[in-house]
Image (cartoon, grey):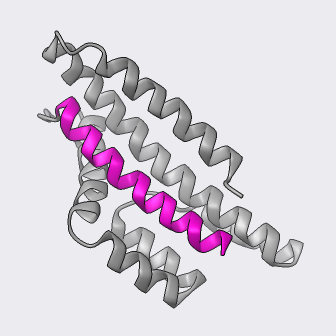
């Protein structure tokens, strides 16, 4: 069974991507929206990782252990692939190895690019991210979240 919270977050973000994709006649407007989508995509990764692992802990561990895990997950920020892999390893070395293999290359680069661009945007730096680029990066983020969810549901 899929996480309702993650599914809702993804559906809202998918809907926004579709709406912004309709602005195909105005590349400058799409570029402005692409920066906003980048920030939302980073939040999606971070929130989804926290939610999935917290739900896993609630279903598999004693309540006090689950509370501790959720407290630790609240500190999880900056969802670069290496940070996600480190957190995953804390739950299962096998999950970490599987996620490392499945995210190698373009997927890893997409997730890391979302986070790097989010930092630049937040600090007022200029970024040249396009709508087409953030769509590809977001697809990578979804692959990572889906893989984590598969681990937690197995």
Q: Residue furthest top?
A: 25
Front one among 143 and 84 = 143
Residue 129 seen by the camera: yes
- Residue at 44% x, 69% y: name it: 84
> Is residue 76 located in the magenta-colored stretch of the structure?
no
- Residue at 33% x, 19% y: name it: 20
* Side of 13 where 22 appears, left or right: left
Residue 74 seen by the camera: no
- Residue at 28% x, 61% y: name it: 107
Front one among 13 and 22 = 22
On-image quarter of the C terminus: bottom right
> Is residue 142 located in the magenta-colored stretch of the structure?
yes
- Residue at 13% x, 32% y: name it: 126
* Side of 102 where 105 appears, left or right: left
| Horizontal and vertical percent position of residue 63 | 88, 72
**Which range of residues does the magenta coloring cover?**
130-154
| Horizontal and vertical percent position of residue 55 | 73, 62
Q: Main secondary structure of the magenta part?
A: helix
Using the rendered view, name the quadrant where residue 53 is placed: bottom right
Q: Is residue 78 above or below residue 39?
A: below
Q: Is residue 43 above or below residue 73?
A: above
Using the rendered view, name the quadrant where residue 86 is placed: bottom left
| Horizontal and vertical percent position of residue 31 | 19, 23
Using the rendered view, name the quadrant where residue 91 is placed: bottom right
Q: Is residue 135 above or below residue 143?
A: above
Q: Residue furthest right?
A: 63
* Side of 64 where 78 appears, left or right: left
On-image quarter of the N terminus: bottom right
């Amino acid at each position: 069974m899929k996480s309702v919270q993650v599914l809702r977050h993804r559906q809202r973000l998918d809907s926004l991507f579709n709406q912004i994709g309709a602005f195909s006649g105005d590349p400058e407007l799409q570029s402005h929206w692409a920066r906003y989508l980048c920030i939302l995509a980073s939040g999606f990764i971070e929130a989804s990782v926290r939610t999935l692992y917290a739900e896993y802990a609630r279903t598999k561990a004693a309540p006090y252990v689950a509370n501790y895990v959720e407290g630790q997950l609240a500190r999880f920020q900056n969802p670069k692939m290496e940070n996600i892999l480190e957190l995953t390893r804390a739950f299962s070395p096998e999950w970490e190895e599987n996620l490392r293999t499945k995210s190698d290359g373009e997927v890893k680069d997409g997730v890391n690019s979302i986070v790097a661009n989010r930092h630049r945007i937040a600090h007022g730096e200029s970024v040249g991210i396009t709508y087409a680029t953030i769509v590809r990066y977001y697809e990578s983020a979804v692959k990572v979240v889906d893989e984590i969810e598969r681990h937690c549901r197995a």
